[in-house]
Amino acid sequence: MSPNTNLAAQEIWHPAEPKPVRGTVGRSAVLPIRPGNESVPKVRLEDVTLKYASETGAGILALDRINLQVRPGEFLCIVGPSGCGKSTLLHLIASLQSPTSGAIAIDDDYVSTPGTDRILMFQEHGLLPWLTVAQNVEFGMKMKGLTKADRAERVRHYLRLVHLSQFHDSRPHQLSGGMRQRVALARALATEPDVLLMDEPFAALDAQTRDMLHDELEKIWAETGCTVIFVTHNVREAVRLADRIALMTFRPGRVKQEFVVDLPRPRHLEEVEVAKTAREILDSLRDEINKSLEAEYANEQRR
Amino acid sequence: MSSAARSEATAAVRYRPASGMNRNERESSNRPGLESPRAGTAGKILNQVIFYSLLLGAWALLAKFKVWPPYLFPAPWQVAEALWAGFLDHSFLIGIAVTMKRMLIGYGLSVVLGMILGVGVASNRFLEETVGPLLVSLQSLPSICWVPLAILWFGLTEKAILFVVLMGCILSVTIAMEDGRKQMPKIYTMAGRNLGASGFRLFWHVMLPASLPYIVSGLKQGWAFGWRSLIQAEMIFLTVGLGQQLMMGRDLNDMSQVIAVMILIVALGYLVNRVVFRTMERALQNRWGLNPTV
């Protein structure tokens, strides 16, 4: 645990630093299947800035010169108060939105259109309700132009991975919230993305389901070796999952601080170490939360 | 259609109740949550039987005591006789056939053209800003207002009737298409783009199915408006058809026939609504898990 202040401007990725141990998750010791070129960051954000016009017409600076590098196979969590632009940042990485200035590179290639190399998982309601579970999982592969046999094979594989094989032909509305998010995860994984972008994917779930999904996600991450950028407002969740945590400020969104979490995996939410680490980060986050609340109250009074 | 009716139509589909424009709909989708469904249905049927028996009884009594002269206020059995006679000499069957044929052609045309227009307006900024307001304002024009224009353009022909039907229902379909594109949850398009869909495939695989609840409600409304326009047009054009038979009843001072034809028009409208649109809505509800709200 090494909290480094004001890292946004510094070199944030330390190649010399040993990679956090991918612990023994489940039964077997796991290694990334797809070792990328370790010297090239998987995702690189260069001075990403986003401005938009508010209802009153005034320009709002949502994201201010975000610089981030994520190395291949890394699990990065982004935490920050609500309204700090965390989700927007993911939309930008997925190219669902364009930054006002700055650039985003995947493997050193600048990107500007959505691609299945980086799949975004939404907080909820991201599944297409008119399709069955299998058709949802199949969707990205269909768009990629895979053959029917290949798709069927992979749908089976990924549904098994998230333990939903028997719900192959169900409709999203017939599933519980946790199951739906697992379908969404399977759908994201099925296109075999290099980067998994997760936008508070477990925020709407109950605590038990969330715990279980943390375990599953960690396992799948270790098995597939994909890079994960996980947005959450829950600091404990971030400590539970992340190799590294980037803390964002409230409006304009900036990367305030970064933390490397080198606790052994698998971690548990209840562990003292996790709580302690979360506490440290939370102290740093508190100012930002207060700012966000103040802004909300100010809005209230204006009304 | 007024703007109030339009907003009601869109409100009806806001991704929860897929149905619910007219009262019949709302009552029939009223599934009590706590009682057993069977008891609810039986209760509903009982209510309906009691209500319509009372209505019919009151009508019969009023006619029996000749509160108004019989040529102005025929008894239920006289109307039933007129209905029976009309079916016996095939005039009603022919009228229904001709009217339904016109309706199907006019409606089919409106649906195709309306959908194209709707997609155009929803996806093109220029069209949205120019044609969009025009569509909404034209909705306030009763379709019967198109009759003089249709007669001058096409004469007293089949084309003119079809034109009136077209103008009667194309706007509902267009506006529903446009609304669907605008109001469907943005997350579906985002998810689609994120998974690699773009251009036509995004439209076909995501936008079109996502706006289906709106489209169905537009189709239903289009049918209702088209049906009214057609009957109105037939009453004026006086070619074979239900509308003409209605006018003939008036000309012959035959109130029984007038009421018989009115009953036919209502029954046909209800039947189509029940069979076609209810089925579509049910299918949609089952697929999407949209719950009919009370």
Image (cartoon, coloured by chain):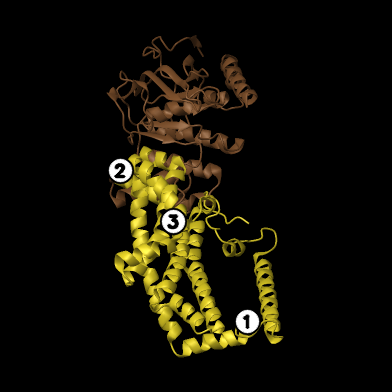
Which of the numbered marks, if any, corresponds to residue B73?
1
Residue A207 located left or right of residue B183: right
Residue B64: x and y, percent? Answer: 69, 86
Residue B266, placed above or below residue A76: below
Residue B59: x and y, percent? Answer: 67, 80
Dot 1 amino acid type? Phe
Dot 2 amino acid type? Gly
Residue B233, placed above or below residue B202: below
User: The residue tagged with tag 2: helix, strand or loop?
Assistant: helix
Name the residue beneath numbered marker 3. Answer: B172
Q: Crowdedness of circle 3 by 10 Å Cα count: few (<14), some, many (20+)? A: many
Please identify which colour was used for chain B in the image.
Answer: yellow
For the residues marked 1 and 3, what is the alpha-carbon distance in whole angstroms? 37 Å
Residue B205, placed above or below residue A119: below
Which of the numbered marks, if any, corresponds to residue B199?
2
Q: Earlier along the polypeptide chain: callout 2 or callout 1?
A: 1
Please identify which colour was used for chain A in the image.
Answer: brown
